[in-house]
Every structure is written in C-alpha cells, then in structure tokens.
Amino acid sequence: MELDLSHSFRISIVVLFAFSASLSAQETYRDNFGSVSYSNNDGTMNFSADWVESNETTDPSAGRIQINSNQLRFDNLDGRYISRSLDLSSATSVTLSFDYDATSRGNESLLVRLWDTGTSSYQTIVTINTSTSGSISYTLTANQISSLSSIRLEGGDSFWSSGERIFIDNILFTATLGPVISIDDITVNEGDGTATFTARHAGLGTSGPFSVNFQTVDGSATAGTDYTAISGGTLNFSGTVGDTEEIVVSLTDDNDFEGSETFIIELTGSSD
C-alpha cells in the first residue's frame, strides 16, 4: 500500500509583534498652577477631572491646601489630602515629574502616591522629608498605568503645625501613546498556495493616514524553498481604529513531508 504524503505537511505561521518607535507619540498631562484653579490643563492632554480636596475646603485660594504664588501649597496639613485622576489606558510608558520646595517643612513630610490597580490602593512613590528644594522624576509601573490612574498628595503624619509648609509645582505626566498594529497567528497547509495575514489598527486613532513597513523572516521555514520572501512591504492605514490590511505570502509546495515549520511577519518601521 502506498501513502500519498504530498499535501500532509502543515506550515505553522508565527507572527512577531515588532512595534516601531515611530508609531508612538508623546503626550503630556500637566498642571503648572499658573492660575488659581483646580481645573488647569497645561499639557497636550486633559486630566480626567479637577483636583479634589478631602477633609478640606474646595477653594483653591483658601484653606490649608491652596494654590499660592503659582504653586500648590500645603500648610498644617493634618488629615487632609488632594488628588487628581487621569486616563492613561492607551499609554505604553509614563513618567511623572514635579518640583518641590520643603525648606519650610519643619519636621513634617509629604507623601506622593499613585493609584495601583494591582493592590486597588494608593501606593507611595516619593516621601518628601528633607528641608530642601528640588525635582523628582519617576517612571510609573504597569499597574499604575490605567484608565483609573490618579495622583494623591497627603501628609506623612498628623502632627503638622501652622507654618510648616511644603510647596509642589509643575506636576507633569509624560505618556508615550500611539496606535498599535496587531497581527494574529495563522496555520495553513503548504499546498494552500498562500498564507493571508490580517493586520489590524488598534490602540489610538490618528489624525490622518499612516503606513507601516513589513518583511518576512525565516523561522524553521526557509524563504525560496517553503515560501516566497517579502522585503519592503507596505501597509497603508486610514488612521481609524479597527482598519485592517492584508498581507499575502506565497507558499511553495515541495511535496516533502517535513512536519510543522514557521516563518515570521516583522514590522520594521512606519511613516507619518
């Protein structure tokens, strides 16, 4: 008895997600406290809400927490805090920076805290407890980057006295945002003739069309023997989330039984 193995070989397509840095853009959420308002949006993006005081007045010009001399001032802070939320769900990385002046803090401290989705609580990232002034830069963790992101400023204890003051200024979140191109894995028979991939625009929309370059890369499958290589391919997207483009790769049926083999679609760069 003879067995026909000419079409029993399956080629398993593995996709490498390679995102070009040019697919991303930097956006900022900033409050430089340049006006006496808890709704300042001085960056390229808007915070989700205004500053919210707790156990304190809601007036940015009065009380123990207030905007004073273009800074956020904390005086005799016992049991009081202030917070502000922002949506960072589309960010791939975020850095928080701010200035501080604690030269009049006495022996008190100020906690800078961020909401953490892993613990469902605020986590302290910086404790200001030296009588100096300076700047802080902090890179957010994955659990601090979400649609529920929030910053909260509160005293380190409940023993503040009148005149013990700490100032915060130029609160700045710098977020790397951008569209994401995803390609699903597929499995086809060598005898099918072609392998068709669907590339999908996810993440954020863009202000206009853009293109993404791609190429094929050998895995255990070999270009020229198992499939036809592509170099310098281009996908043209409209800029609207959900837009799809196809990548069609020609397969070579060599009538040999070889087992499962792979090749890769690699994103190599983008324009606009």
Image: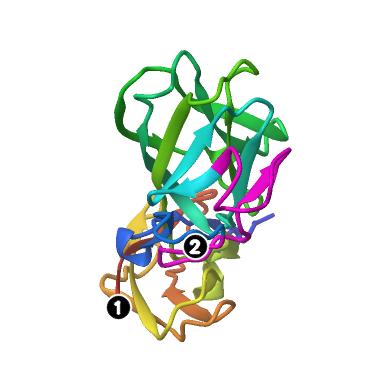
Q: Secondary structure at mark 2?
A: loop
- Residue on which disc 1 sits: 272
Q: Upstream in the sequence, badge 2 or badge 1?
A: 2
Identified by mark 1, the residue type is Asp
Q: Quadrant of residue 252?
A: bottom left
Task: Residue at 44%, 54% (x, y): give it.
Answer: 16
Q: Is residue 268 above or below residue 151?
A: below
Q: Which residues are magenta?
A: 39-65
Residue 215 part of the magenta-drawn span: no
Q: For mark 1, does the 10 Å Cα neighbourhood hold few (<14), some (14 to 19), or many (20 or more) residues? A: few
Task: Residue at 52%, 35% (x, y): give it.
Answer: 74
Camera-nearest residue between 138 and 113: 113
Instruction: Quote the CA–CA distance across marks 2 and 1.
Output: 31 Å
Task: Residue at 52%, 70% (x, y): give it.
Answer: 204
Residue 226 x/y as whole percent: 40, 62
Camera-nearest residue between 261 and 243: 243
Q: Quadrant of the C terminus?
A: bottom left
Task: Residue 40: give its label.
Answer: 2
Q: How many marks?
A: 2
Q: Secondary structure at mark 1?
A: loop
Task: Residue at 50%, 20% (x, y): give it.
Answer: 109
Left or right for 105, reference 156 = left
Which of labels 2 and 1 is toward the front?
2
